[in-house]
Amino acid sequence: MLGREPAPRRALTLRGRAGVADRLGDPGLRLLTWLASGASMVLIALLVYKVFDQAGESISHFGLGFVTANVWNPVTRRFGAGSFIYGTAVSSLIALLIAGPMAIAIALFLTELAPLRVRRPVATLVELLAAIPSVVLGLWGIIVMAPFLNNTLEPALRSLLGWMPLFAGSASPFGLLPAILILTIMTVPIVAAVTREVFQTVPTELKESALALGSTRWEMVRMVILPYAKSGIVGASILGLGRALGEAIAVTQVIGDETGIHASLFAPADTLASRVASTYQGATSTLEISSLAYLSAILLVFALIANAIARLIVRRSTLRMRAAGPRPGLAVTVAEAQA
Amino acid sequence: MSTAGAAPPPPGAHPLLAGSPGLRRRKLVNRTMESTATLAALIAVAVLAIVIASVLIKGVSAINLDFFIKSPAPFGQSGGGIANSIVGTALLVAMASVLAVPVGILVGIHTSEFARPSVASSIRFALDILNGVPTIVTGIFVFGLLVVGHVQSGYAGAFALAIIMLPIVARSAHEVLSLVPSSLREASLALGVRRWRTVLTIVVPTAASGLVTGALLAVARVAGETAPLLFTSSIASNLVSTNPSQAFASIPVSIFTLSEEASPAAHAQAWAAALLLIFLVVLLNVLARSVFGRSQARIGRTR
């Protein structure tokens, strides 16, 4: 390889003129990839514009009052998003409240507790849970989970906690509670996968120092891992929230599609995404279709804010961790791709 | 990476810790939290098992040859299958892939090979945001763009699915292309090979299996999507159709409409369709993972 060998003949072509293909190739490929990126950016702008454009009729008709109005009546042609915003907020926040701690626990199990040969299969199973299509989960929710809730869980909750308005009222197979449980099942795997990647970047020296000082494993988790991974956990949770906010199909299958705000979790309700999905064939007027687009626009704003915040937090914390530890692998991308 | 080897010695046996105050309580708290974490993982796996078992048990009994080769029976009659949805899903996903995979890979090449870091990072941020757009909103967008004033069509459905695929393909392409060691690029450039040849003959082939993984994951994701199709390709004929200027039936939309019906026969068909869909999605995921495993090994060797 070194020095002595005569230079290969081909090297001479380096001095010669580049062929046509080579002269056009560089700017050509650069232009082609630039066009692809440019087209993607235009597509995003067009998406936002078109959703608001379709909502135009409803926006000029109802104005901002739409956001708080608690009505959806095609007969009187009065529409509003109030109860759907309430349903979206309550269902996805409670789902996240349950899913967050569970996901952190799963991530801890997968990075600290499980025997080495169990870790990979269990991690794969948890990620497969994220890959189950939402319509299948919704079908399972209607036929398997709803009767169980109606006959067993909701009566039990009412007799235990019925003094709280949340758990009062008659049991019903369709309502907020089944929607919350389905959303929990959907968000746990995403939050767990991203949290696990974050935990894996905690430097081993830090963990071993804590153990060497005599802390128990839990104390090490509480005093080293959780503080170190705090922002990553927050980012992962908001990513999960973003997914829960926008889920349309599985929610519409189990939530009961009812306009109105009830204190009870057992009562039928509706979310922004679910109302849009359930009205897909039933819209009777251009005003109703435009109001559906208005709901979508509100949902789009929520989702954009949640995602932007989550990405910024996750990016900042992975940048910091890239400096300290191994680089997060494709698993994060895969988990996020399914988010 | 693992701390399994660094577990503390049993504290009772340790002279320094033997007299530590509250040790019994601390050990108890530790034991409790460890069990809680293990329990959480068990619950997650159990939920997966319950869902898959329900789909298997209820789906298998409704699956027969007719299910695959016949169209849905007219209203009120029993029997029939979902051949139209199977063909529809295959065509929708194929058309969406033709649109999204080349563009997505080009975007990945742009962000990892050509763009300035600040530009690349803004593009990736925008793609992440696009990935976070609720799919029902994507459906409303395509409805406004292609369906209003026209009719629902296979083209519109495939376009909606392509929008969902694009950020997944582009992001994973970027990730695997940046895994290619820069020594390979530098070696090629040092030999006088032009940039575009280096990218197309050295970088892309090295990352090829990773690119395939990204595409497969994107396909797995959109094969199960219902929401973007409701407004773009849901009002479809019961007959098998291959004309993309009409709406295609699809497996997810069929499951959705069957699940909203009250008849047990419809539910049985919904379970069978769900079984088929889960089988498809899991197969694609397993395939993607095995392809990626091989590419990791390959990049490891070249390093």
Image (tube, grey):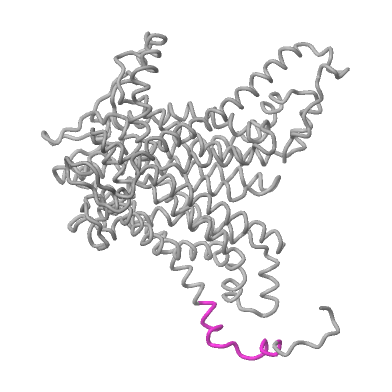
Q: State the residue lying farthest toward the front.
A: B65
For the point 23% across and 62% down, the residue is: B245
| Relative vertical location of residue B246 with respect to residue A249 in this rendering, above or below | below
Residue B272 lies, in percent from the top left, at 35, 42
Residue A77 lies, in percent from the top left, at 13, 36
Left or right position of A155 against A196: left
Q: Is A325 or B258 nearer to us in this picture? A: B258
| Relative vertical location of residue A177 with respect to residue B60 in this rendering, above or below | above
| Relative vertical location of residue B145 with respect to residue A79 in this rendering, above or below | below
Residue B273 lies, in percent from the top left, at 35, 44
Q: Magenta stretch: residue B236 in it?
A: no
Find the magenta span and give its range.
A11-27
Question: Quarter of the image containing the N terminus of chain B?
Answer: top right
For the point 40% across and 64% down, the residue is: B98
Assign the magenta stretch its main secondary structure. Answer: helix
Q: Is B212 or B204 nearer to us in this picture? A: B212
Left or right position of B16 against B234: right
Kindly indicate the quadrant of the structure image that contains residue B15: top right
Question: Quarter of the image containing the C terminus of chain B?
Answer: bottom right
Q: State the residue lying farthest toward the right.
A: B15
